[in-house]
Image (spheres, rainbow, N blue to C red):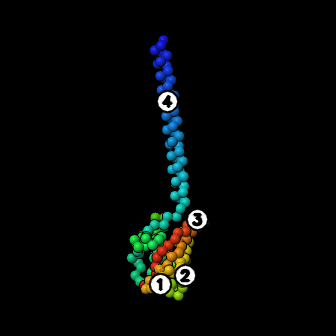
Amino acid sequence: MKYLLIFFSALLLTACKKDKETVSTSASSDSLKIVHDAAKTSSSGKILVENFPFPKEIKECSCYFAKNKADFEAEKYIYADDAGKTAYMKLDGVRLAMNLISSSDMEADEELSKEIENENYKISVKGKKIKGEEALLFEGTLTIEKPDGEIMTTPIYGECGC
């Protein structure tokens, strides 16, 4: 009888322990799933602005910008244009060549302003001249808006010149 009591006690303890492990494992996989789902939602809602090499299409005068001075010096550009007609960016994994709608005259102004638009993005480049020699250095912001109303703004640093 003594052995029978020990056997049932051990069986009961083992059964309870397995239930706890199952609950624990189930809870952690649910929380991982929640975290994963949240990450998926937030990444799908952001506009991805990627670095790209200087466009081969640009032969003469141009403006090109990076997110900051260090990226600019490392040639990690997020925007380039041919100082008049076409702007280049890599957005959401796609390299784009877009028509400039308007562009300020860099030589005459202390401020830079450019507007670019296509069916998927409306882009605005605003900057102030920080240095002017052969090439003009600018700091400012790049704003991208999608048709669904999503807006993303990032600082920029770069130059315009011939």
* Viewer-side label of 3, 1: 1
Looking at marks 3 and 1 on the same chain, the residue that comes earlier in the sequence is marked by 1
User: Disc 3 marks which residue?
Assistant: 150
Residue 121 in sight: no
- Label 3, label 2: how many angstroms apart (C-alpha)? 26 Å
* Marking on residue 132: 1
Q: Position of residue 144 (x, y in %)?
A: 55, 69
Q: Position of residue 11 (x, y in %)?
A: 48, 23
Q: Are marks 4 and 3 in contact (CB under 8 Å)?
A: no
- Label 1, label 2: how many angstroms apart (C-alpha)? 12 Å
Quarter in which the C terminus is drawn? bottom left
Residue at the image point whose x is 52% and y is 49% from the top: 35
Badge 1 marks a residue whose secondary structure is strand
User: Disc 2 marks which residue?
Assistant: 111
Looking at marks 3 and 2 on the same chain, the residue that comes earlier in the sequence is marked by 2
Seen in the picture, residue 154 relative to 21 is either above or below; the reply is: below
* Marking on residue 6: none
Q: Position of residue 78 (x, y in %)?
A: 46, 71
* Amino acid tagged 4: Lys
* Viewer-side label of 1, 2: 1
Dividing the picture into quadrants, the one containing residue 145 is bottom right
* Amino acid tagged 2: Glu
Q: Are marks 4 and 1 in contact (CB under 8 Å)?
A: no
User: Disc 4 marks which residue?
Assistant: 17
- Label 4, label 2: how many angstroms apart (C-alpha)? 70 Å
- Label 4, label 3: how many angstroms apart (C-alpha)? 50 Å
Looking at marks 1 and 2 on the same chain, the residue that comes earlier in the sequence is marked by 2
* Viewer-side label of 4, 3: 4
- Label 4, label 1: how many angstroms apart (C-alpha)? 74 Å
Seen in the picture, residue 124 relative to 16 is either above or below; the reply is: below
Q: Count of labels shown?
A: 4
